Amino acid sequence: MRALIFGASGQIGVPLVARLRDAGWAVDAVSRTAREPSPGITWHRGSLDAMPAVPQAFDAIFSCGPLDGFARWYRGAPVECARVVAFGSTSAAVKHDSPDAAERDVAARLAGAETTLFETAAQRGAAVTVLRPTLVYGAGRDATLTRIASLARRRRVFPLPRGATGLRQPVHVDDLADAAFACIDNAAAAGRSYDVPGGETLAYREMVARVLACLQPPARLLELPQPMFSLALRGAALMGIGAGLGDAAVARMREDLVFDTGPAARDLGYAPRPFRPQPGMFEPPR
Ligand SMILES: NC(=O)c1ccc[n+]([C@@H]2O[C@H](COP(=O)([O-])OP(=O)(O)OC[C@H]3O[C@@H](n4cnc5c(N)ncnc54)[C@H](OP(=O)(O)O)[C@@H]3O)[C@@H](O)[C@H]2O)c1
């Protein structure tokens, strides 16, 4: 069996490739960076916008990179493949009515890409499944919890605004790789999108507190009144820290972002782990 993977070098792509290799698949992977060959994987240097020459037929195609680029490529690609599994994001639902125009744009692109994928697959008689993760962690490469851990390691303290009690469901990269792998040969998942949240629902402040507590040595959570937090954030921005944490993201810390594991559990046997952080999960790979 042969698979084509986009994003094979990414935090979800790496464990997915491992599962495919263990199951005896030959993997063709596209990367924008030249990479050393390794057993079972053929790297092709290129990108979704500048595709290298790859074989024309696969048993499965996986997208673990940007969904909009993948949907565009798939629409025009001369490739034969009956099974496509692509990662999207719950951001499509969370950010569609954000006060931040850039966030609304992200949501619109994700939703548009899903539509394009399903339309293209229907024309080709292929089966597509889209998996929408919540907040991803586990490989020391995510932009939220690993970033928090990295700042906290340096300063021994991490500030949050008081009232950061919105519910979250952090999801481990290995559980997402399992979900993608479970889509292969799964007729029930054809033509469907699934939310794939983590296995525990907890308050934002509790999620951060657990990360800080697992560090060696542990760091302290400092809860500040909103005006003080805004001031601290402005100071951090001047030092080049806290980029990407806009007003909309701060306001969302009070909002519940909760998704149902039920459909993925029923169709894919999806059983994500509870949130039990270990220090190694937030250390960037060497
Ligand atoms: N991180 C999260 O919290 C989160 C949450 C919800 C959904 N998701 C979704 O899950 C998927 C995977 O996310 P991730 O966090 O694992 O990503 P990641 O670690 O940032 O990896 C993304 C991969 O995409 C590849 N890529 C980027 N641009 C590309 C292009 N133009 N052409 C070809 N490949 C390209 C990169 O490969 P090379 O560098 O080797 O080219 C990279 O390995 C994405 O669809 C993301 O939107 C992530």
Image (spheres, rainbow, N blue to C red):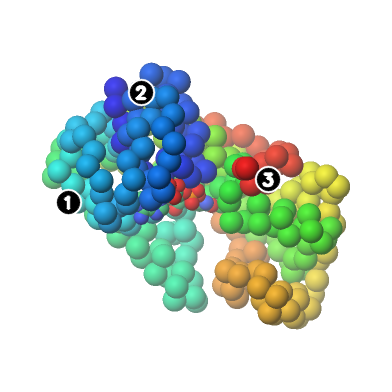
Dot 2 or dot 1, earlier in sequence: 2
Q: Quadrant of the C terminus?
A: top right
Residue 161 is left or right of residue 99, and the answer is right
Q: Are marks 2 and 3 in contact (CB under 8 Å)?
A: no
Q: Amino acid at mark 1?
A: Gly
Q: CA distance from mark 2 to mark 1?
A: 25 Å
Which residue appears at 75% of the width and 76% of the height? 232
Residues 66 and 204: in front is 66
- Kindly identify the residue that appears in the image at 78 percent across and 51 percent down: 212
Q: Which residue is mark 1?
A: 76
Residue closer to the observer: 261 or 237:
237
Q: Are marks 2 and 1 in contact (CB under 8 Å)?
A: no
Position of residue 137 in the picture relative to residue 133 (left or right)? right
Residue occupied by mark 2: 25
Binning the other alpha carbons within 10 Å of mark 2 as few (below 14), some (14 to 19) or many (20 upward) gives some
The N terminus - image quarter = top left
Q: Position of residue 180 (x, y in %)?
A: 42, 35
SS at badge 3? loop
Q: For mark 3, does the 10 Å Cα neighbourhood hold few (<14), some (14 to 19), or many (20 or more) residues?
A: some
At which x and y percent is residue 122?
Answer: 17, 43
Res. 141 visible in picture: yes
The amino acid on which the numbered mark 3 sits, given as a three-letter code, is Glu
Tag 2: residue type? Trp
Residue at which label 3 appears: 283
